[in-house]
Image: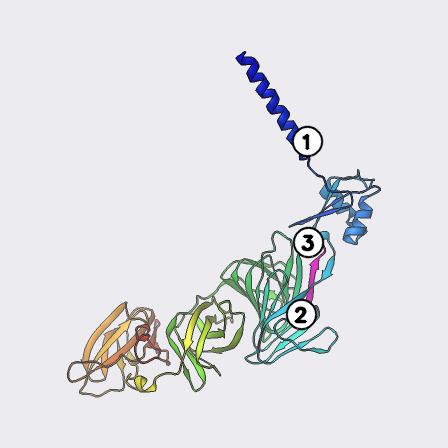
Amino acid sequence: MRTTLHKLILIFALAGGMSMARSAPIETPAPGSITVNASGIVYYARAGDTLLGIAQRLTTATANWEALGRINHIRQDIRIPIGTGIVIPTELLPDEPSDATVIARNGNVTVTGSDGHPLAVDVGTKVAEGARIDTAADSFLTLQLPDASRISIPSNSEVELAKLRKARYTHAPRTELKLLQGKVVSRVSPLNVNKGTYEVHTPLSVAGVRGTYFRVGMNAGKVTDEVLEGHVLVGSPQAPHALMLNPATGDVIRAAEVGPSIDLLPAPALAAQPYREDGSARFFLAPVKGARAYHVQLARDADMVDLIAEATGDSPDIHVGHIAEGDYFASVSAIDRSGLEGLPHVFAVRIEDRDDAALAAIGPAPSVVRSDAKEMVLRWNGAPDREYNVQVARNLDFSWLLFSKTVTGNEARFPRPSFGTYFARVQSVNPDGSTMPFSFAQTLIVTDQWIINDGRPVRPREELSSSTYR
């Protein structure tokens, strides 16, 4: 009896399962319908369909029937059974027009349409394929594509939107920029899955990506490529796939010859709190070994989309003009001797007028006046009968001291440091034993033969919270 009961339970369970299966049948797409996925579409054949007809109707190129046959394992152009799913990858889908939207604009920006007529642009304006963009000094434009990729065009640049298209059905972007002068900075949404394309062309080069953050610059007959995130395939018209650049690397292209991959310089640290002087924001950066110049940009947002000003200089003391007091975001980077701009450091900063009375209390920085194989001599403007504390360190906040001594007079001798970069400062001691603020820090570059003063002393980090800056 127990066995019979178990059999009955099993029969009822199976019957219930069969009933449930009948109530929720699996639906197949209707013949002639299309489903869209990340990498393409699937078309479900209708009566009379052949590969030739499908290729012509859905890819606009009859010749694609052979590729469709290989992909779908159909050897001949015969009538396809009704409801058969035919996979069509994004690469075979035709183009449709797309556009870009202005999301930030500052300064003197000129946009000319493909018909040669100027366009009035502001935030929210749609820009179509063929438009040419020119930015003047301290002028910026940022565009956003439908897939959220961003194109930033900084000062003194000329860019043509050579191709703004998308694949039919999947909307995978197909974007091509032509850089004529200056620089373009791209933040490209991942394209690996949807098989979209994004390329930046110059007369000497082409850079193609599958989702990354990179810069392309063109100036004085050379092109620079700098990859900050992801990978970029760069080349010339003669060798379009010459070099794959990894993150934090770049290359220089001259006369259509692709140079080797070069490691980008690290971002410089902020050596002192920026302040406003004569209407300009003054930035003090820690020197970076191998840098020949430094670049500072200011924006209203942390993503550096709404850029408002920028400046480049040969020393770590950079003046960014016409800045009102207020809160900003800054991006700082170093430029190497080949012209490649290094990795950026972005931070929030408050810029206010400096307190000149407090700055006047800071004495002048020391300089190297003499050196030989064994020692170096530092000197500063000071009284011969006054005591001074003198320090030499390996870093700007002077937490890694190399030498520290108290001397009478305006000169101090130290053993010659080994090859590298150092910082020196001096502090006046009052007759009652109290001390004045330390001087600005002098950068000392020690080579095999010379000890060189950087020439532009910077404010050490430990003074950031002092009353010298508001």
Residue wearing tag 3: 170
Q: Quadrant of residue 431?
A: bottom left
Residue wearing tag 2: 126
Residues in magenta, as a range: 162-171
Of 269 and 224, nearer the camera is 269
Residue wearing tag 1: 22
Q: Which sits earlier in the primary sequence, circle 3 or circle 2?
A: 2
Residue 40 counted in the magenta span: no
Q: Which sits earlier in the primary sequence, circle 1 or circle 3?
A: 1
Name the image quarter holding the C terminus: bottom left
Residue type at mark 2 is: Lys
- Residue name at image x 63 percent, y 64 percent: 145
The reply to whether residue 447 is in sight is yes
Q: Secondary structure at mark 1?
A: helix
Q: Secondary structure at mark 2?
A: strand
Q: Nearer the viewer, mark 1 or mark 3?
A: 1
Q: Residue 63 in the image: state x and y as whole percent.
A: 80, 50
